[in-house]
Amino acid sequence: MLSIWGQQPRRNNKYRKICGPVMPGRYRALLLFLVLFISGAAAGQAIPLTLAEAERLALEMEPGQSALLARAEALDAESTAAGQLPDPTMRIGLANYPLESGGFSTEGMTQAQLGFRQSFPPGKTRELSAHRFDSLALEMRESADGRAREVRSAVRRAWLETFYWQRTQVIVDQSRPFFEDLLTVTRDMYSVGRKNQQDLLRAELELSRIDDRLIDIGSRHAKSIASLSQWIGSASNRPVADRLPGWTQVPALELLHGNLLQHPALKAAEARVDASKANVDLAEERFKPGWAMDLGYGHRDGTLSNGDPRSDFISLSVTMDMPFFRKNRQDRKLAAALSERRAVSASREELLRRLDSQLEAEYVQWRELSRRIDLYEKQILRQASDSAQASLVAYQSDAADFADVMRAYIDDTNSKVEYTRLQVERAKSYAVIADLGGILQ
């Protein structure tokens, strides 16, 4: 008889009586590997996803930053090429060949010509062109750093939102058993005539509302996970860590304003301004003439009347541009470059004002949220819990209405949820402040 592994077991009856059928070694190893792999995968899914890990995964998987760095490399190559002289040109020809009579040696001016031409752009065009591409490459590198900050901020917002809905689901789910117990107590008291039917119906209604709220929370939680998956892929399916980062302090606003000037977006804007200045300089250099040098050699065949061989020719000439008609060419290009420089400079100033205003607004919001969190921790959470417990004791003693108990326990649950929301919103404000103010963590 074949075993479950499809092979004939060994006929060692003495051993089989003690230990049973023997599993082949390679199958045992395969089974052990599968068990360990499945256990490891399940354990990996259960490991909480910390915010630091989410940021690392997002930056590793981010294609936008890689694209900007690739553009910077391309512009660096363009800068090197722009600083070089144009390639020389070569000319090969036959000059003054007689059509009606004779051959290559018949006429004295018949030549086989070879010439070279080297052009030289006007003024400092090459240096300015290289500097322009260098500035554009710097803009791309700064934009790549800015993209990394944007991704980090986006991941932080998505992770924090997922944390909020995960935590809210736990809070509301933990409150459900109380409403179930309250429904049971109300039903028992109603059966002995101590409560009326309205209280019983109200208890059933509130329990149904809790279930509806859990469904809504689950939907929002799923949406937040989907938003997080945009940045970290399948790792978003893991539960997030159950603790927020310890972002409870921020530097002084004056220091943050100073660090704002080093923000990659502003440095990229400054690089654009520098590139636009190079464009203006290039437009001005085009008012200067470009020139070219030609070197030619002409070979002649045949002999002179005295029997001597004809001499070969060599020629050298210089060609120069004459920018006389510059009204619709050089003047227009200079005007366009000046307008572009003004536009880029204005955009940089507008960006600075917008980021500065955003920094101040987030700083104020962070401070106000901190004050509210402090109030919740010192008073509101304790007061809501005490009120709920007191109302329940009074209800059991027929000293309070059922509506008072419901309101008190709903307020207690809502206070915990609101406290979580305040913590998450403060963390989001910190993330924005960290991005604008250059805080490393």
Image: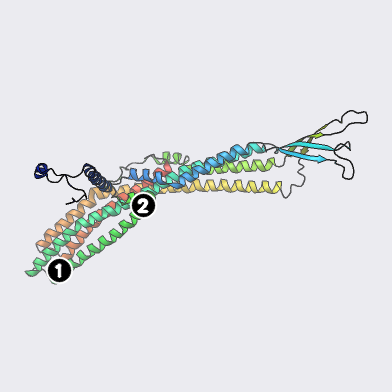
**Could you tell me which residue is drawn at 93 percent across and 31 percent down?**
305
Where does residue 267 sit, x and y in percent of width and height? 51, 41
Q: Residue furthest right?
A: 305
Q: Nearer the viewer, residue 264 or 53?
A: 53
Label at residue 46:
none
User: Label 1: which residue?
Assistant: 200
Q: Amino acid at mark 1?
A: Leu
**Considering only vertical position in the picture, is 251 above or below 155?**
above
Q: Secondary structure at mark 2?
A: helix
Q: Which is nearer the N-term, disc 1 or disc 2? A: 1
- Name the residue nearer the viewer: 342 or 148: 148
- Residue 266 percent coordinates (x, y): 50, 43
Left or right of residue 370, residue 97 in this image: right
**Could you tell me residue 322's position as x and y percent?**
77, 42
The x and y percentages for residue 297 are 79, 34
Locate the C terminus and report the quarter of the image it occupies.
Answer: top left
Q: Residue at the spot x=25%, y=46% of the render?
A: 34
- Crowdedness of circle 2 by 10 Å Cα count: few (<14), some, many (20+)? some
285 with respect to 187 (left or right): right
Say whether marks 1 and 2 touch (CB < 8 Å): no
Rendered image: mark on residue 229: 2
Point 17% across, 66% down: residue: 203
Quarter of the view holding residue 113: top right
